[in-house]
Amino acid sequence: MAFEHDLCIRGAGIVGRTLALLAARERLRVALVAPTAATPGHADVRAYALSPASQALLQSLRCWPAESAATPVLAMQVQADGQGHVHFSAAEQGVAALNWIVDVPALEQQLAQAVQYQGHIDVVSAPVAAPLTVVCEGRASATRAELGVDFDSVRYPQQAIATRLDCERAHEQIARQWFTPEGDILAFLPLGGPAGREVAVVWSVPSERAAAITDWDDATLAAHLHELSGAALGALQVKGARASWPLVLAHARRWVGAMPGRAGESFALAGDAAHAMHPLAGQGLNVGLGDAAELARVLGAREAWRGLADLRLLRRYERARQGEWLRMRLATDGLQLLFGQPGPLAGALRNWGMTLFEHSGPLKSRIARLAMGTV
C-alpha cells in the first residue's frame, strides 16, 4: 500500500522531536504524534546534564537554548561521606565544558518551534500508518505494551526528589554531588548561566524516607539541603515546585520488530521507551538522544533498494544502541551499588575507591571522556 508518511513517531518529548527533525533532514516524511493541548500541572523543575555530543547534535538542528537556560559546567566536585572525593575539570580535559545543565522547558520550546517550521513534519493527534513507527513515549509507554514487548524493570530502593534552589553564593559553573552515610545521593546542578545563583536539585533518598521528605515545607527542605551540602553555596531558598519519582533499572527485550497484523510495517523503540537507568551519572537523556541520532543515521545511510520496514536494517540500529546502553547500564548500576548503600563498611569502601580513582591519571581522563561522549 502507499503511505502518506515514511515515519510515525509516537511521543513528542525531547527524543521524539529530535528524531523527527533528524529524519526530516534526511528528507523523510514524518508524522509526529503529539497531544493537542498541554496538560495543566505544576511547573517543570527538571534539568538535564547534556554531554558535548548531545550539545553538538542539538546545535546542528539549531535547537540549542539561550545561555541563561544552558549553563556550561566547568568543573564537577564529587564528595563522599569521608575524605574521599573526585574532581573533574574542563580545563584538564582540554574542552570548553564537561557538559551543560539545560532547563527542560526551554529545550522543549526550542524543539517545538523547530518542528513547527519543518515542512517534512506533520504534527498529528493520533497515530497514522507508516512503514516505520518509532515509539518515544517514555518509560510507561502504552504502545510498547500493545506491541507485546516485555519491559524488564527492577526498582532501586530509592526515589528521586527534584526541585530548584536560589543560593546565597554563585554556583561558579560547578556541578556538585554528595554521598551520605545513609545512602543519599545529592546533586546541585548549576542553572541561570555562568553568573547564576540557581541550582537544580536531584536528591536520591531511600524509599522509606521519600514520603516524609516530600511533605516538608520549603524552609525545612532548604535547611536539610543546606546541611547535606556542607553550606557549599551559603543560605538556600526553595524556588517553585518539587517532584518525585521511583528509580528503576529497565530495558525492553526487543527494540525493533514487525508491527503485529500489519504487513509492510515495523517498529523501533527509542529513549525511555527502550531503557531507563539511575540518574546519578546524568546519562539518561544523552543515551536517548544517541538513539535518535543513530536511528536517523541508519535510515539515511540505507541501501537504495532497502525499505524503512526492513528488519535487517532496523537491527543495525538495535545492535549499536543496545551495546551503548549496556555500557552505560553497567557504569550507572555499579556506581549505585557502590554509592547508594548505607553503613560504615560501604562508606569506607567508597571513600577508598574515590581516593584511588582521583589519582588514577589516564583512567580518570578516559572515564571523563566517555561521559562526555567524545570517545
Image (spheres, rainbow, N blue to C red):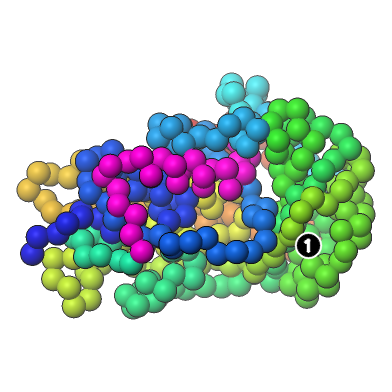
Question: Is the residue 22 above or below the residue 317 in the image?
Answer: above
Range of residues picked out in magenta: 100-125
**Image position, residue 339 (x, y; %):** 72, 56
Q: Where is residue 309 in the image (x, y as percent from the top left)?
A: 18, 59
Residue type at mark 1: give it. Gly
In screen coordinates, is 332 left or right of 181? left
Q: Element type at marker 1? A: loop
16 on left or right of 219: left
Q: Residue at x 25, y 55 (%)?
A: 7
Q: Is residue 310 visible?
A: no
Q: Quadrant of residue 257?
A: bottom left
Which residue occupies 72% across, 47% down?
200
In the displayed structure, does residue 28 sit left or right of residue 318? left
Q: Residue at x 71, y 28 (%)?
A: 194
Q: Would residue 67 be found to the left or right of residue 32 on screen?
A: right
Residue 144 position, x and y percent, is 38, 71
Q: How crowded is mark 1: few (under 14 residues within 10 Å), some or many (20 or more)?
A: many
Residue at the spot 55% in from the left edge and 60% down from the top edge: 277
- The magenta stretch spans residue 12: no
The relative height of residue 245 versus residue 76 in the rendered view (above or below) is below
